[in-house]
Amino acid sequence: MLTDKRSFVEMDRDMESRNILSFPEYEDKLIAAKEKSREKEAVICGEAAIGGSRVCIFAMDGNFMMGSMGAVVGEKITRLFEYATRRGLPVIGVTVSGGARMQEGMVSLMQMSKVSAAVKRHDKAGNLYIVLLTNPTTGGVDASFAMLGDITLAEPGARVGFAGPRVIEKTLNQKLPDGFQKAERVLECGFIDEIVPRQEQKEYLERILKLHGF
Amino acid sequence: MEDYEIVKGARSEGRLTASDYIKALVKDFVEFHGDRLFGDDRAIIAGIGRIDGIPVTVVGIEKGKDTKERIEHNFGSAMPEGYRKALRLMKQAEKFKRPVVCFVDTAGAYCGIDAEERGQGRAIAQSLFEMSDLKTPILSIVIGEGGSGGALALSHADRIWIMEDAYFSVVSPESCANILWKTTEKADAAAKALGLTAGRLYELGLVDRVCSSEKTDDLLKEIAGEIRKLKQLPVEDLVDERYEKFRKVGY
């Protein structure tokens, strides 16, 4: 939807998760996730054109184990940033995630470190990274590459935050204020550049890319 | 010991906290305060001193010892300004070519309305982002609880060490059991499945050394030796090796 017609070429599409820790019921969950999402993992990466500008793009899939990040998600996004760094291409990232994937233990948590380091290299080389936060972007994804964009956009009403609302409610033993962790409130708090509705996103990205000389 | 017992032990009162390690290992420690943006988070103590004669920057997540201290240090759960203070002082360490030593001990970053609205996610992300490229050696030691993103934020290091009776986990066993099996009663099974003990993490190649807290003199020598080794590397190699260290996790 964001990319020019027939311009998207997928990368690393066959990478699939393994049950590294022999975590109970993980294989079954992976099978169910593949059926539900019709994808092999919770992120799709590739190269495409937006308004004629070449970009690298990744889009997470909330239907695949709530967009959780395990080793494959971390590896695919890292590879995409490395590819983009080598070619001087911008990265557009569309996030949706419940956070790190528990079933992969510390391996999944450390994907936050791995991807953040790859974003840093892309950044240091002077490349553009635009994040589009969709509902919900939370946990380990919020606390890593979702919050590292040069330009941070969000869909209206998207939940954006580190801790889950139920956890906070339980910890504080109080009701959360209306609009808490909603994109509009997060923008007010200073962490989002603009809220962009779905039908305007492509044009918005085209404009930003052109302003960066692409 | 069962994995869940290790988790409970790592949380228990009477353990050595970051300030104990600093007292035992760091000479002439001078604490500095504040993130220069919002405030000073007492969950994180940070400053400079010497380890075996080497000038270092020290960052520790402090839980406090008794109830009064625990409240003062917010039970070792840091706010965004805590991570920003840590990062400010780590950037200073880079400037003055001091190695950084972090003592990690937290159930997790603080989760609250204020923490969220001041950007807890962004603060942790920035810590990972900047530490990945910090041009000075970093050694992080998990001394008790390595609770998820809040602990990871100070563990983007050249070497990650862990005490033999500490743990490091993506999620608490209770939350994990609650999410997967709708009951915290199965926390022991979750703890086992998560592979969060020092021994298991070492087997998985995710930590570099398992340490004992019994003899601080030995620990002091190990830390000093490692810092000296890291200091000898050309700084570009150091940063490249740090990149590769995390690059290969899971692949």
Image (spheres, grey):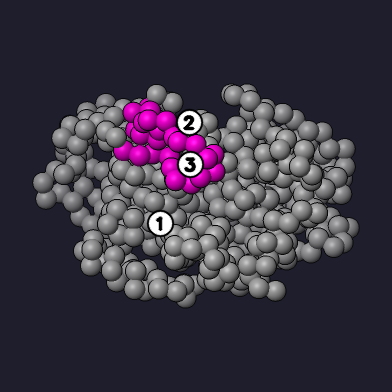
Q: Nearer the viewer, mark 3 or mark 1?
A: 3
User: How dense is the environment of label 3, judged by Cα within 10 Å: few (below 14), some, or many (20 and up)?
Assistant: some
Relative placement, left or right, of A2 versus B59 is: left
Q: Nearer the viewer, mark 2 or mark 1?
A: 2
At numbered mark 3, what does the secondary structure look like: helix, strand or loop? helix
Q: What is the magenta range?
A: A158-187
Front residue (pair A21, B127):
A21
Per the image, the residue denoted by label 2 is: B117
At numbered mark 1, what does the secondary structure look like: helix, strand or loop? loop
Residue under the image location 29 percent in, 53 percent down: A62
Q: Earlier in the sequence, mark 3 or mark 1?
A: 1
From the image, which quarter does the C terminus of chain B lie in?
bottom left
Per the image, the residue denoted by label 1 is: A69
Image location (x, y in percent) of residue B220: 84, 55
- What is the CA distance from the residue labelled 3 to the residue labelled 2? 15 Å
Per the image, the residue denoted by label 3 is: A169
